[in-house]
């Protein structure tokens, strides 16, 4: 594993949750609870620092991390996740794309709360833009409306409506592989979980979109 953050994530998982319960050439898996598994991909990403962490979809009403891709139960995904508790074929799932140690620590706190049946904490996407002071006159900035502060899970009914409307395929490239729910207007820009603001994208199209509208 040449990716430093993947190595760090594996070390933290072993410390917090004990040794992994399953290993393949592509993933390491932990059984967090009898019905809660988590999977770290060790084969990807291979072009940037980061780590993919798979989790079962949280209960209705719980917040979803900003760094997560949401996979409906009908969508295909990494097949090595299916053997883990709560991640079986046909079940919805989350894929966290962790870019920093801060996001990794937040993800561990999220998993521990999930394990202990506690309210799930928010995970904000860490700002990766330059931290140098801005020379812009902030007094001239327009006043914007308050945005949604908490990212709620997409209700199952809304998921089904979006799935049926989009025909179970990516609206950008048409594939039926590795589909997830995408917010057309991102939560960070005030988007919400309405049918009009959701669409099906494949993993590649979703990741390439990022935080753009």
Image (spheres, rainbow, N blue to C red):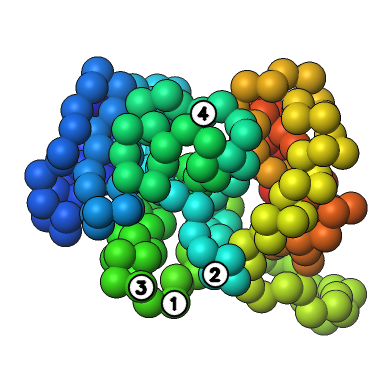
**Between 158 and 65, which is closer to the camera in this rendering?**
158
Please say whether residue 133 is visible from this viewpoint: no
Q: CA distance from mark 2 to mark 1?
A: 7 Å
Tell me where residue 13 appears, x and y as whole percent: 20, 50
4 or 3: tag closer to the N-terminus? 4
Badge 4 local density, few (<14 within 10 Å), some, or many (20+)? many
2 or 4: tag closer to the N-terminus? 2
Tell me where residue 75 appears, x and y as whole percent: 61, 31
Which residue corresponds to mark 4? 77
Q: Secondary structure at mark 4?
A: loop
- Which circle marks residue 119 in the picture? 1
Please determine whether, in this image, residue 126 is positioned above or below residue 4: below
- Which circle marks residue 62 in the picture? 2
| Marks 3,1: beta carbons within 8 A | no
- Mark 3 against mark 1, which lies toward the viewer? 3
**Between 23 and 6, which is closer to the camera in this rendering?**
23
Q: Quadrant of residue 107?
A: bottom left
| Marks 2,1: beta carbons within 8 A | yes
Badge 1 local density, few (<14 within 10 Å), some, or many (20+)? few
Q: Secondary structure at mark 2?
A: loop
2 or 1: tag closer to the N-terminus? 2
- Marker count (numbered): 4
Which residue corresponds to mark 3? 117
Q: Is residue 152 left or right of residue 95?
A: right
Residue ID at (79%, 79%): 146
Q: CA distance from mark 2 to mark 4?
A: 22 Å
Please determine whether, in this image, residue 69 is positioned above or below residue 169: below
Please determine whether, in this image, residue 194 is positioned above or below residue 76: below
Badge 3 local density, few (<14 within 10 Å), some, or many (20+)? few
């Amino acid at each position: 594993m040449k990716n430093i953050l993947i190595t760090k994530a594996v070390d933290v998982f072993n410390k917090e949750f004990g040794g992994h319960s399953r290993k393949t050439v592509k993933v390491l898996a932990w059984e967090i609870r009898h019905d809660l598994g988590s999977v770290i991909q060790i084969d990807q990403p291979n072009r940037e620092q980061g780590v993919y962490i798979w989790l079962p979809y949280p209960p209705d009403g719980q917040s979803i991390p900003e760094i997560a891709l949401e996979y409906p139960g009908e969508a295909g995904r990494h097949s090595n996740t299916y053997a883990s508790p709560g991640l079986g074929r046909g079940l919805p799932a989350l894929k966290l794309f962790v870019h920093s140690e801060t996001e990794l620590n937040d993800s561990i706190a999220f998993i521990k709360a999930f394990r202990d049946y506690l309210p799930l904490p928010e995970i904000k996407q860490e700002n990766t833009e330059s931290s140098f002071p801005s020379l812009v006159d902030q007094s001239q900035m327009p006043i914007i409306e308050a945005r949604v502060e908490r990212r709620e899970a997409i209700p199952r009914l809304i998921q089904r409506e979006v799935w049926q409307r989009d025909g179970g395929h990516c609206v950008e490239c048409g594939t039926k592989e590795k589909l997830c729910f995408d917010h057309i207007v991102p939560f960070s820009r005030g988007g919400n979980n309405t049918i009009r603001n959701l669409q099906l994208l494949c993993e590649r199209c979703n990741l390439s979109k990022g935080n753009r509208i």
